[in-house]
Amino acid sequence: MATTVVIIAAALVAAAVVVAVVSSRRQRSAAPQEDLVRAVDEMRSKMDALAGELSGALERAEQESRRNRLFGELGGSIDLEELMDRVLDAAMEIPGFDAAMMVVERQDGAPALVTRGMTVDESARPPTSGVVGTLPGTITVSYRYGRDRDGPDLELIRGGAFIPLMGRELRPVGTLSLFWRTPDLEPSAQDIEQAEQLAASSISAIENARRYGEARKLAETDALTGLFNQRYFQETLRREVTRAHRYQRKLTLIVFDLDDFKSINDQVGHLAGDRVLAQAADRLREAVRSVDVASRIGGDEFAVIMPESAAEDGEQLFRRVHNSMRGTALGPDEQRLRLSGGIAELLHGDTPASLFERADAALYRAKELGKDRVDIARAGEVRMDPEARRES
């Protein structure tokens, strides 16, 4: 490619010299010379063609260089979402495509979805291939819209190419989908082939990222409840506090504690007590939002990090969890499960430790006030006797 560009550039320079010489002679000649005029016009046309070829060659070389660089970066990440971002970056460098989407099934069965060049509505309701089940291979689909939706000024998705991602033993792990918006136009066979090569080259990295994600999940998850564990909670709290301070965002932390859990263990036994903890975690998981981080941070203690939330949002969450748990009966005497909570909203100057200490102090105060309730932290307060609540 580099040699071709050099040759074309040299030809352009030579052509420019010839045109300059011919033009100079033409100006010195008093009589019109038709042959000379035709020669000049032909030379100019050839020079324009050579300039266009040079420009196209340079553009193709740059695109190929970007694609090769992005292809080479695919194996550089073991985070699934980051890897999918890189695949779509490479896909959008292929001519003929205006949007892209990648869906990969995680090890736990939950799909991960990443898009490029799509509107919010298109991402929420992405175009489909119309094929139920596993794709038999790469297929292309054309889309038609009603007159009320179609029009020359609307950049609607007009077609898509759907490429299955096949893992080991030909097991499907996801789909790479590429779309175009130009009416009555499909990418060339060469463009589709490049997309298929991209999909094939990403398979190994995707499987590695899926395995890493599964191992990471096991390391970050509490085995009994399925919630995040204390280590993950501490890491996330530190990250969210830093982010909230940097971008001046709201952040709220709520800490829960099952009331009289020791007596529950004494009454129904430790194995049954573990089932109570798992049941409480289920109630908590059902109540939190998708952006909240629910964790088990101790024996019968839970915490929820609530980004972009104020103390009032924490109160609403406590009420949802509280009402859900009150309907849970324990033991032969139908004892009801109760819990207390403490809420702290991030203040200027708060550290992760001080935010947690204020939420914990509010929880301890809720215990002192009679349990089965929630309290909101005050600025600067710290609970001085951290062992006092162990028996409550």
Image (spheres, grey):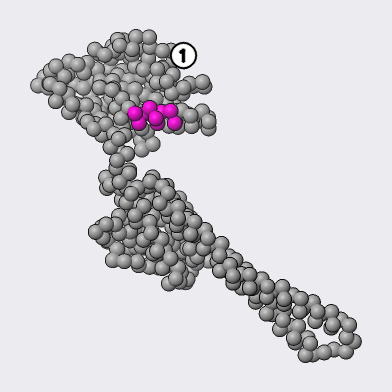
Residue 39 visible in rendering: yes
Give x and y (percent) for residue 302.
Answer: 30, 25
Question: Residue at horizontal 22%, vertical 31%?
Answer: 224
Q: Which residue is mark 1?
A: 380
Q: Residue at x 40, y 64 (%)?
A: 197
Q: Residue at x 38, y 59 (%)?
A: 201
Q: Position of residue 368 (x, y in %)?
A: 31, 10
Instruction: Name the main secondary structure of what is drawn in magenta.
Output: helix
- The location of residue 42, given as percent across then percent down, is 71, 83
**Residue drawn at (74%, 75%) of the image:** 16
Near-viewer residue (75 or 300): 75
Does the magenta run of residues contain 235? yes
Q: Is residue 49 above or below residue 153?
A: below
Of residue 203 and residue 341, the one placed in the foreground of this image is: 203
Judged from this view, the residue extending furthest toward the left is 332
Report the front residue among 21 and 316.
21
Magenta stretch holds residue 284: no
Q: Which residues are magenta?
A: 231-240
User: Which three-letter amino acid code belongs to the residue tagged 1?
Assistant: Gly
**Vertical order, 109 against 242 (above or below):** below
Tell how many labels: 1
Vertical side of 364 occupied by 100: above or below? below
For the C terminus, give its image quadrant: top left
Rendering quarter of residue 133? bottom left
Name the quadrant containing residue 315: top left
Q: Position of residue 278 (x, y in %)?
A: 21, 30
Q: Which quadrant would the N terminus be assigned to in this image?
A: bottom right
Asked if residue 88 shows in the view, the reply is no
Q: Would residue 209 appear left or right of 281 to someone viewing this image?
A: right
